Image (spheres, helix red, strand yellow):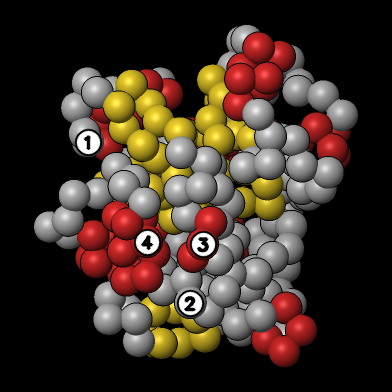
Amino acid sequence: MKLYYDFHIHTALSPCGDDSMTPNNIVNMALINELDAIAITDHNTAENLEAVMKVARGKDIIVIPGIEIETKEEIHVIGLFPNLQSVYNVQNIIYSKLPYIKNKPNVVGNQYVLNENDDIMKELDRFLLISTLLSLNEVIKLIKDNNGIAVPAHIDRPSYSILSNLGFIPDDLNTSILEISRFSNLDVYKKQYKDYQIIQSSDAHELGYIGITKNYLEVKEKNIESIFNIFN
């Protein structure tokens, strides 16, 4: 069966995410755009995941726990996980490896932690959109050690990507999945990187971009296990 996905969505917790990116707005926009599965991938944090998953309960959509980690080489890597505990384990390590810089909401945006009713529970004061002290290989290992799938993000972008910062895909990269942004042609990258699985997501920071890429995976069943089986 075809499973329409968007595996790169930010909430209002990411400083670059619009304040309208609340749990209810995200889930409802995904449903309006007939998505079957989404992943929440805030920058270096997973504190809004549980709220989004609670909103999605009883609705015909899968929410995959995720996080977008910035390596010390300033490469963004998405981690997708089978459950909340796995991503929380990763978040705890990321927080310990994230230099403390106080956020400036009037400059870079708010960082809201929300509940399932879209109420603001708190505002993180540590700036999230910075590099961790972990290398690319260390980040991928961290994700995999916690039962996750590691995906170098938006490799076609001129910044924060593996190609823009390294200039190539390392032979010893311990993952077989790459992501391109909504701006590129999926078929072109599939032909260029035949040894990898290429996915394309929205990297939505605003509601209007959720599901814009209209891509799907062929899965046996509509569940998280079937999705992970494709990538493993």
Q: Amino acid at mark 2?
A: Ser
According to the picture, the residue beneath numbered tag 4 turns out to be: 29
> Could you say which quadrant of the image residue 32 lies in?
bottom left
Q: Which mark is first along the chain, 2 or 4?
A: 2
Mark 4 neighbour class, 10 Å CA radius: few under 14, some 14 to 19, many 20 or more:
some
1 left or right, relative to 68: left
User: Of residues 158 and 95, which is closer to you in this image?
Assistant: 158
Q: Which mark is residue 223?
A: 1
Q: Amino acid at mark 3?
A: Gly
Disc 1/disc 4 C-alpha distance (Å) = 20 Å
42 left or right, relative to 109: left
Q: Which mark is first along the chain, 3 or 1?
A: 3
Residue that appears at 71% across and 14% down: 192
According to the picture, the residue beneath numbered tag 2 turns out to be: 20
Q: Which mark is first along the chain, 1 or 2?
A: 2
Q: Position of residue 35 (x, y in %)?
A: 34, 45
Residue 86 visible in the displayed image: no
Q: Which mark is residue 68?
A: none
Residue 13 drawn above or below residue 182: below
Q: Which mark is residue 208?
A: 3
